[in-house]
Image (spheres, rainbow, N blue to C red):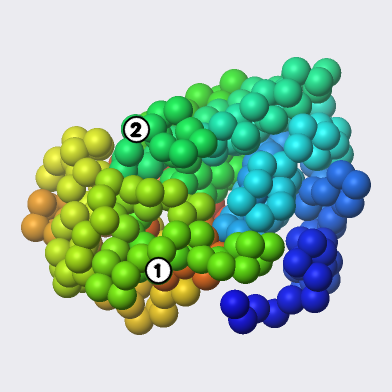
């Protein structure tokens, strides 16, 4: 294993110090318990949007904190849920009195700890579970679909609504709608390596891929031989088309997301392959995002996320955002 490391046990706090140093105009960080939050928080009369999860998926979630998106993010250790005291402290820091919306990826540890934090929090709050991964219905550490890159789409659209003054009930309903209209599926070419473990999470042969892999290296639908990019795109897209019941009248957001070790040239190729397939179905890609946004440390591979947009969702996607990872409209 070759990585930039001092002490693996100190990787997260050192990394967060560096991340916030690089974005000190936007962010602050609290330790003991650990959370990253907007420098200008709390924002008067604004619903606070909070998310989090295990580290190793950067820029999700800390890279999505800022105007137009999250108010705070709670990073756990690598691939490990944040603790309830992190979530509770973050809520207390950023709640302006308008309430808190927790956006939670569907992993058992995340769900349990966010539920505990919600029970301890005395302010007005609600939670929304993201479960956009259509690869498998039940997986390691989950009951039902996993929450993956569609979480970013939920956070962007709901973050924009909150920035514009939407109340807690509207933000919660909107998050549920965006999640229901989003579907994702990923493929791994290699395993990832957790720094503390020092070896690949799973073994995969040079000629093999894992179709439907999870963002922690969980098994997917099947292990299969490597095929062309066109064939991979077709196998990734078909379950998404089925889940969303896409028709020729639909307008969609297409996110092609890298898992951390795939070059942009290859991600761009995958975007083209998926785009041609959607063109063939007369589905209109009216918004797009391409790059590494919900990663799995150093895994080679990618995921495809499609969100069926309605006019309100499209307008909120276009609304200004200013975070470390997403910036437009300002």
Mark 1 falls on what kind of element?
Answer: loop
Q: Position of residue 204 (x, y in %)?
A: 36, 65
Q: Which residue is mark 2?
A: 137
State the quadrant of the C terminus. Answer: bottom right
54, above or below 97, in the image: below
Q: Which mark is residue 292?
A: none
Q: Position of residue 156 (x, y in %)?
A: 54, 48
Q: Residue at x 84, y 56 (%)?
A: 29
Q: Position of residue 249 (x, y in %)?
A: 16, 42
What distance separates the C-alpha of mark 2 from that of mark 1?
23 Å
Query: 239 or 80, which lies in front?
Result: 80
Disc 2 vs disc 1: Cβ atoms closer than 8 Å? no
- Which residue is most to the right? 32
Query: 11 or 185, which lies in front?
Result: 11
Count the labels in the image.
Answer: 2
Q: For the residues carrying marks 2 and 1, which lies nearer the camera in this image?
A: 1
Q: Residue at x 50, y 24 (%)?
A: 173
- Which residue is most to the left? 280
8, above or below 314, in the image: below
Marked residue nearer the N-terminal end (2 or 1): 2
Q: Residues within 10 Å of mark 1 (few under 14, many from 20)?
A: many
Residue 322 visible to an observer of this rendering: no
Q: Residue at x 69, y 30 (%)?
A: 113
98, above or below 240, in the image: above
Q: Quadrant of residue 262?
A: bottom left
Q: Position of residue 50 (x, y in %)?
A: 69, 39
Q: Which mark is residue 190?
A: 1
Query: 103 or 156, which lies in front?
Result: 103
Mark 2 falls on what kind of element?
Answer: loop
Q: Would residue 201 be found to the left or right of residue 100 on screen?
A: left
Q: Residue at x 80, y 76 (%)?
A: 6
């Amino acid at each position: 294993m070759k990585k930039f490391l001092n002490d693996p046990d100190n990787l997260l706090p050192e990394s967060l110090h560096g991340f916030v140093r690089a974005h000190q105009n936007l962010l602050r960080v609290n330790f003991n318990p650990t959370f990253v939050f907007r420098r200008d928080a709390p924002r008067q009369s604004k619903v606070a949007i909070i998310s989090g999860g295990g580290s190793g998926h950067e820029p999700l979630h800390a890279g999505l904190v800022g105007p137009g998106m999250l108010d705070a993010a709670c990073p756990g250790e690598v691939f490990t849920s944040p603790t309830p005291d992190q979530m509770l402290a973050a809520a207390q820091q950023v709640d302006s009195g308008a309430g808190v919306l927790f956006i939670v990826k569907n992993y058992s540890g995340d769900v349990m700890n966010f539920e505990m934090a919600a029970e301890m929090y005395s302010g007005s709050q609600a939670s929304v579970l993201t479960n956009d991964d259509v690869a498998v219905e039940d997986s390691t550490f989950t009951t039902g679909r996993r929450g993956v890159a569609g979480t970013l789409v939920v956070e962007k659209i709901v973050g924009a609504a909150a920035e514009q003054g939407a109340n807690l009930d509207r933000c919660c309903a909107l998050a549920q709608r965006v999640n229901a209209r989003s579907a994702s599926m990923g493929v791994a070419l290699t395993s990832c390596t957790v720094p503390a473990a020092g070896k690949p999470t799973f073994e995969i042969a040079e000629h093999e891929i894992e179709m439907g892999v999870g963002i922690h290296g969980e098994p997917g639908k099947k292990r299969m031989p490597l095929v062309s990019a066109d064939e991979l795109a077709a196998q990734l897209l078909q379950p998404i088309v089925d889940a969303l019941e896409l028709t020729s009248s639909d307008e969609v957001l297409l996110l092609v997301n890298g898992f951390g070790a795939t070059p942009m040239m290859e991600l761009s190729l995958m975007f083209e392959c998926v785009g041609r397939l959607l063109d063939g179905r007369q589905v209109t890609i009216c918004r797009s995002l391409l790059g590494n946004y919900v990663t799995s440390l150093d895994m080679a591979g990618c995921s495809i996320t499609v969100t069926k947009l309605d006019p309100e969702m499209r307008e909120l996607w276009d609304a200004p955002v200013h975070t470390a990872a997403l910036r437009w409209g300002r």
